[in-house]
Image: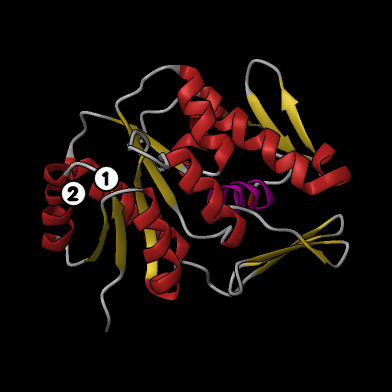
């Protein structure tokens, strides 16, 4: 069986080596890019082979936000984890706005990064072929596709996971901690704005059906059947 390949993008060779070594020890294949332009070239050349992208934000020339935005124009599904030395709330929100699925601040534990990658890839390959349907929304786990009133909608990896979790728990009020634990996995050190940003984008892409995702003030969200 071919190894799953991770594209690691960082202008610091030391950082690329650190991440590469831990990924190789965990039996992943690794592709590398030293800047934004090279990342785009590698992405288009090896697009079908790339299971996930680890993307640094601060790079000379084309930064990680620009790379993420361009990749998302062509691929809504490939998971993207952004790495950054920035810790301001607006920077993290900017990453999610451009289509990042997770956001990890430097310095970080390489073991935790690999654990996050493994969790994401397990979930992305865990579809059992079930089809979830309600109110004109159809989610096909085998195809990892979503249609609303028979029209396909493009969702990022995390938006898809979030909608699937809502549909699996339709009619149930879900607090933010429970959503983080189940969609971002138990070791995610994020907070409410991570969920709120993704819910806002998901609602927008769902059009009128987005109104079915109700805000439960002081708690979290509920998808009404």
Q: Give residue 165's position: percent from left, percent from top.
A: 60, 49
User: What residue appears at the point 16 percent right and 42 percent down from the top-left corner?
Assistant: 15
Residue 161: in magenta span: yes
The dot on residue 158 is none
SS under mark 2:
helix
Q: Are marks 1 and 2 in contact (CB under 8 Å)?
A: yes
The dot on residue 10 is 1
What colour scheme governs how the chains and residues are painted in the rendered image of this protein?
Answer: secondary structure
Q: Give residue 48's position: percent from left, percent from top.
A: 44, 75
Q: Nearer the viewer, residue 33 or 127?
A: 33
Q: Which quadrant holds the N terminus?
A: bottom left
User: What residue appears at the point 18 percent right and 57 percent down from the top-left corner?
Assistant: 23
Above or below, 109 against 86 in this view is below
SS under mark 1:
loop
Q: Quadrant of residue 59?
A: top left
Q: Which residues are magenta?
A: 158-167
Residue 50: in magenta span: no
Q: Give residue 150's position: percent from left, percent from top.
A: 85, 67
User: What residue appears at the point 64 percent right and 15 percent down from the top-left corner?
Assistant: 218
Q: Is residue 80 left or right of residue 1?
A: right
Residue annotated with mark 2: 16
The number of numbered badges drawn on the structure is: 2
Above or below, 127 against 15 in this view is below
């Amino acid at each position: 069986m071919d190894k799953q390949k991770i594209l690691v993008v960082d202008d610091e060779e030391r950082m690329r080596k650190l991440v590469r070594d831990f990924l190789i020890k965990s039996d992943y294949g690794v592709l590398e890019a030293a800047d934004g332009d090279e990342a785009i070239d590698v992405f288009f050349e090896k697009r079908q082979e790339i299971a996930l992208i680890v993307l640094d934000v601060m790079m000379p020339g084309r930064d990680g936000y620009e790379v993420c935005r361009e990749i998302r124009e062509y691929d809504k599904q490939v998971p993207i984890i952004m790495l950054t030395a920035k810790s301001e709330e607006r920077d993290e929100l900017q990453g999610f706005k451009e289509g990042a699925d997770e956001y990890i601040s430097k310095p970080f534990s390489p073991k935790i990064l690999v654990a996050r990658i493994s969790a994401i890839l397990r979930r992305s390959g865990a579809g059992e072929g079930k089809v979830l349907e309600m109110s004109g929304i159809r989610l096909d786990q085998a195809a990892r596709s979503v249609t609303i009133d028979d029209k396909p909608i493009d969702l990022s990896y995390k938006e898809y996971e979030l909608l699937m979790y809502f549909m699996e728990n339709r009619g149930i009020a879900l607090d933010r901690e429970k959503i983080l634990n189940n969609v971002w996995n138990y070791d995610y050190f994020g907070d409410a704005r991570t969920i709120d940003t993704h819910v806002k984008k998901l609602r927008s892409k769902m059009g009128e059906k987005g109104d079915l995702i109700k805000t439960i003030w002081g708690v979290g969200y509920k998808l009404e059947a």
